[in-house]
Image (cartoon, helix red, strand yellow):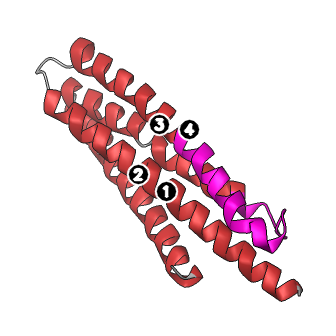
Amino acid sequence: MTHELSMFLVNAFGDLAIACWLGLAMLLFWGLLKENGELIKRAIKYLINSVTFFVVYVFYMTFAIYDKPPVPTAQLKEWANDILLQQLLISGFVVVILLVVNFISCRKLESPRRTAELGLLFVGDALVMTGGAWIASQDGYLGLLEEAARSL
């Protein structure tokens, strides 16, 4: 993966997050306008699940705060992989919390049981979190590698 490709993926991820939030905001507004309680509950559930985009942004920013590599260049890949492992553990924790929230939402708040959405949301959250963590670590590694080459 090149640094240009990783930057493209980061920007595409950001555009996807903005599109999701705009769509959910319009859905929530439509539900409020039509006084449709079920639509409002579903929109809020999906907005809660969009917290994954914020977590991925934090993952990306953990690498963006470095202007110089914190370790020697030979150990940079290992350092980035260590941070990726930490981020994947955090991702698993967040996905499990969201699964519990979605399960409670499905069982207690929504009248028609939408159990298929539980699986869809779980897979979507897991893909966003793991993909975002991987892209952030690759972009951080490649960016710091370029900085190390410039400073030589």
Q: Mark 2: which amino acid?
A: Val
Looking at the rendered structure, the kind of residue marked 4 is: Ile
Residues marked 4 and 3 touching at CB (< 8 Å) = yes
Neighbourhood count class around disc 4 (C-alpha, 10 Å): few under 14, some 14–19, many 20 upward:
some
Note whether 106 is above or below 30 in the view shown.
Answer: above
68 left or right of 41? Answer: right
Distance Cα–Cα, label 1 vs label 4: 12 Å
Q: Residue 128 — which label?
A: 2
Position of 17 relative to 124 (above/below): below
Contact check, label 2 and label 1, Cβ < 8 Å:
yes
Amino acid type shown at disc 3: Gly
**Mark found first going from the N terminus, 3 or 2:** 3
What label does residue 90 carry, if any?
4
User: Which residue is the site of mark 3?
Assistant: 92
Residue at 53 percent across and 74 percent down: it is 6
Q: CA distance from mark 4 to mark 2?
A: 13 Å
Whether the magenta-drawn stretch holds residue 74 is answered as yes
Of the image marks 1 and 4, the number of the one nearer the N terminus: 4
Q: Which mark is residue 132?
A: 1
Q: Is 85 situated above or below 112?
A: below
Q: Are marks 4 and 2 in contact (CB under 8 Å)?
A: no
Q: Main secondary structure of the magenta part?
A: helix
Callout 2 environment at 10 Å: few (<14), some (14 to 19), or many (20+)?
A: some
Q: Residue furthest right?
A: 152
Q: Nearer the viewer, mark 3 or mark 2?
A: 3
The span shown in magenta is 63-90
